[in-house]
Amino acid sequence: MSTSLIFDIKHYAINDGPGIRLTVFFKGCPLSCKWCHNPESISPHAQKSYTASKCIGSQKCVGICPNNALVLTENGIVTDIGACRLCGKCAEACPTKAIEMSGSPMTVEEIMGIIEKETLFFDQSGGGVTFSGGEPLMHPHLLLKLLKECGRKGIHRVVDTTLFTKQAIVMEVASNTDLFLIDIKHMDSTKHKEFTGVHNELILGNISKTANTDVGIIFRIPLIKGVNADLDNIEKTAKFIKNLPGKTRSIQLLPYHDVAIGKHAKMGNTVELEGMETPTKEEIENVISVFDRYGIQASVN
Amino acid sequence: METPVININKNKTVPARPARAEGNFYRKSTNKIGPGMNARIQKLRKESFEAEPTLSIERALIETRFYKENYGKYSIPVLRALNFLEICKKKTIYIGDGELIVGERGPKPKSVPTFPELTCHSVEDFHVLNTREMQRYTISQDDIGIYEKEVIPYWEGKTQRERIFGHVPKEWKAAYEAGIFTEFMEQRAPGHTALDGKIYKKGMLDFKKEIAEQIEKLDFLNDPEATDKSEQLKAMGISCDAVILFAERHADLAEEMANQEKDKKRTEELNGLARVCRRVPAHAPQNFWEAIQMYWFVHLGTITELNGWDAMNPGHFDQHLAPFYEKEIKAGNLTRDDAKELLSCFWIKVNNHPAPPKVGITARESGTYNDFTNINIGGLKPDGSDGTSEVSYIMLEIIEELHLLQPGNSVHISARTPDRFLMASCNVIRQGHGYPSVFNPDIYIQEMLQQGKTLDDAREGGCSGCIEVGAFGKEAYLLTGYLNVPKILEITLNKGIDPLTGKKAGIETGDPKDFKSYDELYNAFLKQLNFMVNQKILVSNYIDRMFAKYAPAPFLSVVIEDCITKGKDYYDGGPRYNTNYIQCTGLGTVTDSLSVLKKHVFEEKNISMANLLNAVAKNYEHEEELRQFILNNTPFYGNDDDYADGIAIGVYNDLLAAIDGKPNIKGGKYHLNMLSTTCHVYFGKVMGASPNGRLAHKSISDGTSPSHGCDVNGPTSVIRSLVKLDQTKSGGTLLNQRFMPGLLKHEEDLVKLGKLIRSYFTLGGHHIQFNIVDTATLYAAQKNPEDYKDLLVRMAGYSDYFNDMNADLQQEVIDRTENESF
């Protein structure tokens, strides 16, 4: 049976679309945004995470590891990444869940089972299911099955995506989705490449194609001072959105916060987030007024 | 991706009144007069808020002198009624400056009388109450001296408490002392009641007429109970006179004050007040002002006559007041602001009445000033239509603006309740005062039908006190005490011995190390459970009889349906319905403990019974690894996990089987409800560690909520777990959900909260309540209590000031699952 790696399922998700939602997070993303809030979502493979503060030093993991990849140090458990085969035995043995495997393979049936338990909340609140990630479009086979199954059952579907994939996939997903939440990170392709690892032509092209379909669209812009919050980029973004076919779409601004640093540490990574800052209230107001001039409604959390 | 809310309307992203805005509890208000709608209300609120609770010996002295002179001259009901009349005749009358609603139980606001006929405070009790850190009640040395000389000697051996404790079987006593159950009636009288609409249609003179007619009808030739009925009815008539007299004395004082008043406006008010007090409660009220004052006199009458649990409740107060409001608004005799001011005065009046303090050990342990008056807002009318009115919205405004400890309040959200009322309620919930709690009439009406009430009576019913349901104005529904269900498992695992004391606390049900299957263990637990329930009922029945015989409540009987026609007291089967509740506490803790035993000991066999019991006995000392394994690898209740929830359903159904439907001695039945109030903290204290990884003396789970911190899948999963219990078979369940303000920043979040409530209720939930506070605020409040004097936190069925709680209760609030991080 085909599966995809799911790294989290969030209940009572109130920030991922209308109403009360259930958000399914796919693992794996073609982008690697420096500021990513969910760094554990980027790798398409299962990963091991370790929370030092939960570790009580039982060394169960050390004993069970078939590859002797673990050792207890003053700073907690250290994994020899070269030796680790990601078999997950250490996570199973850990009494405190200090070691956890991020990403577990799930089938359509398993995911639908969880979704369907919550339909009453969706019905009451005008909510539904949101597929997020990572990049859900990296899993077109499973995603489309889920979207079609939800469609058949009348469950409202949101896909939270970068649209960085083949156009054919985008179009098929679009025809089976009620609402897209589409990230726009930067209008300058070189900058886009610098901060996210990929150029933006494919993304912008797919946005234009999607705008011609019936799917609802809300744009989301992670607003990061030092990356994309400058008015020049905002102006370009506004123009781009304004010139899209179809009705005017609204924008959500997600002001940057450095919450990811702790999450990176759990994955055993250190990151450099220098030069990235949270925009001030005033700067956010300025951004909003740029969009306002173009007749685009932008709002902030 | 972590993403923000979708803001459909950007102009509405900021709530009209952010949680930390002016007039809210976060703000120090030392230099300001404080919240409230206008100068009068601000002043009265401030006075009420700042008044120190004191003890008044006035009532005890009047009563003791009366008893000394008159005991034996009259039948007990008549003696009780005459005693009540004497108190109403002699007690100090108080009318405060600016007050529009008048009457105090004591000689002044927050001055609390004692009830020596129920429980007589000792000199030591007074010293404790005078000096304890929390919920202090001050009393002067002189008064203690008078009490010691006059009151204490007379009541020695004659109090209800002594009658009860002098007569309990040793098995009951052993279980009680081990903390397996509590007994409500050892401290206060049965009460737990609320009124229907009859006092807005009839005055005391009308009731007196009905009483006289009933006496006329008595058949002394053929009815063996005719004499008893006659005495009871006479007593009811006397008690009607008592409250009329009480009101007349207020009218006299108001007129006297008016004569001396220089301010013209106040003179008019005092004269108006005098007219109101001459009209009610003798006659039915004619306008909004009289209607509120009518209720307040009846309230005061019942809490002066005796010290019944939960003081008194007006029931569906908005529904009762709405016809008066609408009539007067239409006629132009009343403005919305007038109505709001009068209601605010009423709110403050209730706040002036802290609960009378307990005696004995509990005097040291404290509890709360809250006396559990609970105003029901919204809901359904007896004809099944929507009960909300403009008065309901005014009440919500008052709750938000005054944020007083008392009265408690609840909103009742039926499928027929408009969304705009639900949203207005959510808006108040977001302010974080802990009020209002939210009830589901569509389910509690079914609960009452299931208990045998008529549809109309059930619809007129609601929730009083904390979460218990009853047919308002027609039922005595007594809470008899809490049952510590996890403790019953604890002694089952210890062969009937309380591991904390080594004393025998229950029956011997076998050595758990010999149990071959989970069923064997569970059956032993059930055997122990049934034994305890029977002990509890045995003594409750005796206590019921003692109240009927020695401490009847003739005035309360006047206002509860069928007592007059039956000629029987409220405590003696007089009301139309007579229910005894046993409140079962700790469903989460016992379920999770059983889940550990079932899964790890009997199914997967990865922990031996001996090892588990050994670790539990040591309070998991040097067993942290095992404890962590249990905490992280066991299905726990509250996560929509059928394994754990299945166990919870089983326990719940077996509690029902043990309790529900057993006859009480008043022609009614025992039912269960799943209330804990703060008793889960006490119950935790008297317990060692439990198999679910809970450490010794930590509180057990509250109501039907999951164990603290064990619900890790968010509120929809908690709700799905809870609705697997057939809640309609209970007399109330309780779900605490802690919400951090971050989850309720936007208008849209509020709508989602409302829809979450609707979802729970559609699925069959009875009650849900929210605490909207952030942990940082709570820690700050612990550090700098004086800066957070106003911090109200919802506990379990009621709210309390965070600063008035002891450290255990405070920690409990902090420990509750923080939904922001799920």
Image: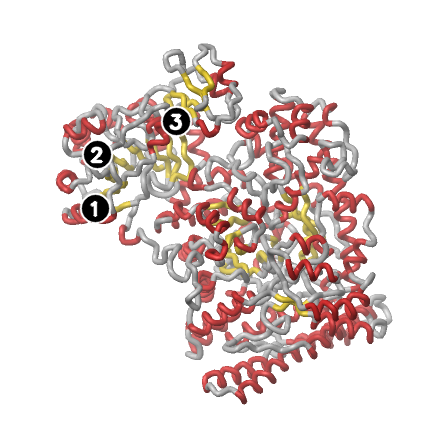
Labels in figure, total: 3
Q: In the rendered image of this protein, does residue B756 appear above or below residue B613?
A: below
Residue nearest the observer in this picture, A217 or B505: B505
Quarter placement of the N terminus of chain B: top left
What's under tag 2, amino acid-wise? Answer: Lys
Which quarter of the picture shows residue A17?
Answer: top left
Quarter placement of the C terminus of chain B: top left
Q: In the rendered image of this protein, does residue B314 appear above or below residue A282?
A: below
What's under tag 1, amino acid-wise? Answer: Glu
User: Picture coordinates of residue B592 (x, y %)?
Assistant: 59, 33
Would residue B765 be visible to someone looking at this image?
yes
User: Residue at the location (57% across, 32% down)?
Assistant: B644
Residue closest to the far bottom: B259
Q: Earlier in the sequence, mark 1 or mark 2?
A: 2
Secondary structure of the residue carrying numbered label 2: loop
Q: Determine which of the numbered discs, if any, sits on residue A283 in the image.
A: 1
Tell me which chain the residue with mark 2 is part of: A
User: Residue at the location (38% across, 18% down)?
Assistant: A2
Secondary structure of the residue carrying numbered label 1: helix
User: Residue at the location (42% across, 39% down)?
Assistant: A12
How far apart are the alpha carbons under marks 3 and 2? 25 Å
* Residue behind mark 3: A266
Residue nearest the observer in this picture, A287 or B437: A287
Tell me which chain the residue with mark 1 is part of: A
Tell me which chain the residue with mark 3 is part of: A
User: Picture coordinates of residue A120 (x, y %)?
Assistant: 44, 40
* Residue behind mark 2: A185
